[in-house]
Image (cartoon, rainbow, N blue to C red):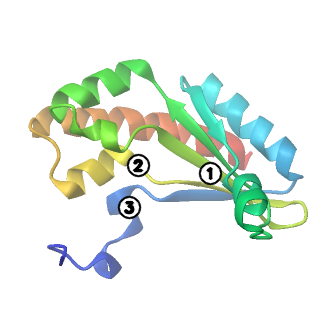
Amino acid sequence: MAIPFDPHELDPEEYGETRTTLSTDHESAIERVREVCTDAGFGIPVEFSPSEMLNEKVDADRDPYYVLGACNPAMADRALDATDGRIGGLFPCNMVVWEAAPNEQVVYHISIMKTARLLGLPVDDEAMDAIIADTGEMVDAVFDELAE
């Protein structure tokens, strides 16, 4: 199945790719991201370590990799309405932390709101524009704080 656009031609801004690097150990980076997300208005209802699971289940020998599923209930509620509930397939907004090298942790995020827009999920473009702006401010606040 061909997608209607070439993903290699997309600017990362179009899907809200954001990243930063923290100079710390993996566990401290996870704690820092959790704390900053909470301070910015996100809850973390889901957390898991794909690396631990893969290392255990298929002997993958993966470096530390952790996913914090961030959610702001008010934004999630608005996004469900603006997409006839379909954005739930992208929930939650993940903040990923992976160890690039000892004491070098990458924090990575892709906007599910912008991704939903690219996929054509919104049924209310005006509402989705407002959600993208509001969640973008929250994510920017997280990454601004992490960069300090």
- Pinpoint residue 62: horizontal percent, then vertical percent: 76, 67
Single out the mark in the foreground, 3 or 1.
1
| Cα–Cα span, label 2 and label 3 | 9 Å
Image quadrant occupied by the C terminus? top right
Q: Are marks 2 and 3 in contact (CB under 8 Å)?
A: no
| Cα–Cα span, label 3 and label 1 | 18 Å
Give the total number of marks visible in the rendering.
3
Q: Nearer the viewer, residue 145 or 28?
A: 28
Q: Which residue is mark 2?
A: 111
Q: Are marks 1 and 2 in contact (CB under 8 Å)?
A: no
| Cα–Cα span, label 1 and label 2 | 12 Å
Single out the mark in the foreground, 2 or 3.
2
Indicate the amino acid at tag 3. Glu
Indicate the amino acid at tag 1. Val
- Which comes before the other along the chain, label 2 or label 3? 3
Q: Are marks 3 and 1 in contact (CB under 8 Å)?
A: no
- Pinpoint residue 67: horizontal percent, then vertical percent: 63, 46
Q: Residues within 10 Å of mark 3 (few under 14, many from 20)?
A: few
Q: Which residue is mark 3?
A: 13
Q: Is residue 132 visible?
A: no
Residue 142 lies in quadrant: top right
Q: Which residue is mark 1?
A: 96
Q: Residue at x 77, y 37 (%)?
A: 32
- Pinpoint residue 93: horizontal percent, then vertical percent: 47, 40
Q: Which mark is residue 147?
A: none
Q: Is residue 125 visible?
A: yes
Indicate the amino acid at tag 2. Ser
Single out the mark in the foreground, 1 or 2.
1
Q: Secondary structure at mark 3?
A: helix
Image quadrant occupied by the N terminus? bottom left
